[in-house]
Image (spheres, rainbow, N blue to C red):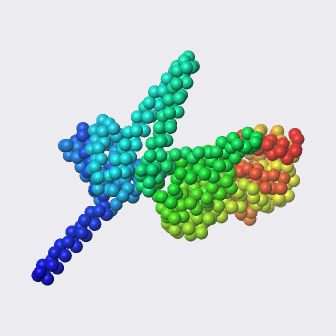
Amino acid sequence: MNTKLILRSLSILLISLLCANGMAQGYKIDVTLKGWQDTTLILGHYFNKKMLVNDTIQIDSNGSGTFTGSKKLPGGVYIIYMPDKSYFDLIIDDQQHFAITAQKENPVQTLVVNGNKQEKAFNDYQKFIFDKQATASALQKKLKEKGEAHPDSAAIWRKRLNELSAEVNSYWDTILSEHEGTFLASFVKAMRDIEVPMYNDTNLPDSVIQVKRYQYYKQHYFDNMDLSDDRLLRTPFFTGKLENFFTKTVVPMPDSIVKEAVRIIEMAKDNKEMERYLIQFTFNMANESKQMGMDAAMVALGEKYYLSGKADWVDEEFIEKLKDRITKLKPNLIGNQAPDLKMQSFNNQSFRLSEVYAPLTVLVFWETDCGHCKKEIPALKELVWDKYHDVGVKIFAVYTQHETKAWSEFITEHQLEEWINVYDPYHQSNFRNLYDIYSTPAIYILDENKTIIAKRIGAEQVPDFIEHHLKSSGHTY
């Protein structure tokens, strides 16, 4: 055989293989939606409780068009979004060259899939679930409207609801068995709640059993979710599951939040995308929390993952700003010893915060030109000073400005002379950095050892903290 002919044939074969391989690396989804014509369709995916757009196409007069791209889409649950703002879900994973056909009015129930076994199985699952949900909703409606008047019928309806639940669980088991190793199986398993032992075989008190069940649930919450699988990030439920864990399962205390955050981030260490998301999620959750004291969790997570260099995706500007923020927060975290302040009154007397003897000290930073201060400072006198000064509660009031005339007039007008009224005329105390004073008023509560027990609360909240602390420490008033 001619050598040139052989080489030419091999070259053509190689080019064909390369072209085929290039096509296989991308995605090609042929879509026909009967009832739509000459309009735009959007392909997107779920992420962080939002829909992110991947591609758009213009469909023709037959409702047909093709989503195509040179790079494969990351696996997950995707959305076909239609002009009337309705949509339906698809699973896209390893098979990314396939075709779907559906009717405009009921796309899930009419969907036909060719070339994607996972999506076909997912669509069958959706149809099954929609059917069971419709039946369950009808039964629940009957129970609500007629259950009390017809107890025998209600018992039958409840039995049927239990049977529906068993049918759904059985269907899930079938998916896990028949599609083991696929994203569909991972998706279905992740949606299932864990089974918590009843501990009925123990002689423990009910209160102890409830604690054991809670501890088991918390420890095993993620057993059905493979946190090394970043495809779960692109599902409609993943972020909600995380939020439920941290807001309804974990005790809302900084130490508990940090402990659990570190634990689940460690579960994702083999998947950089998932690990990054969990670091960002837990840090942002702590940073944006309105709960008093949660800044301690932000500081701990910020130091462990961002300032350590672990979060290598952020830029130097972010790191510098975070470093500055943490530096200002660390001295005044709840549980810390309050930084000492040496300041003076408008008649030049010196006072040290550490030398104030009191079962509780209210430390407040304020100024006369602050509109909110004009309401909070008189409220602090009425709600706190007038009620608790007889039991030794002191108010250490730091004026943050330098114009003493307006300050002294405000003190006189509102009868605040018995407070420890001080300021820092020579900028020696560094109070703004030590107590993170970027706005006023700012109220801290210190115990008898000058440990910070509350911070950045309103005047109306102070009495509850005082009463709780005085009672728990044995003080009477």
Res 303 visible: yes
> Does residue 309 appear to the left or right of 399 in the view shown?
left
Q: Position of residue 135 (x, y in %)?
A: 44, 30
Q: Residue at x 34, y 45 (%)?
A: 81
Q: In this view, does 151 lie above or below 282?
A: above
Q: Is residue 285 above or below residue 376?
A: below
> Does residue 335 appear to the left or right of 136 in the view shown?
right
Please identify the residue farthest to the left as the structure is shown.
2
Task: Tell me which corner region of the image, top left, top right, bottom left or bottom right, holds residue 311.
Answer: bottom right
Q: Which residue is drawn at 65% across and 61% down?
A: 300
Task: Tell me which corner region of the image, top left, top right, bottom left or bottom right, holds residue 111.
Answer: top left
Nearer the observer, 155 or 448: 155
Q: Is residue 145 above or below residue 451?
A: above
Nearer the observer, 399 or 381: 381
Q: Residue at x 55, y 45 (%)?
A: 193
Q: Where is residue 272 in the image (x, y as percent from the top left)?
A: 49, 64
Please identify the residue farthest to the bottom as the structure is shown.
3
Q: In which quarter of the image is the C terminus?
A: top right
Nearer the observer, 6 or 228: 6
> Does residue 418 appear to the left or right of 117 in the view shown?
right
Task: Tell me which corner region of the image, top left, top right, bottom left or bottom right, holds residue 334.
Answer: bottom right
- Across the whole image, how many numbered discs are drawn on residues? 0
Q: Which residue is drawn at 37% across and 51% down?
A: 118
Q: Where is residue 471 in the image (x, y as percent from the top left)?
A: 84, 42
Q: Position of residue 40 (x, y in %)?
A: 27, 46
Res 441 visible: no
Nearer the observer, 409 or 309: 309
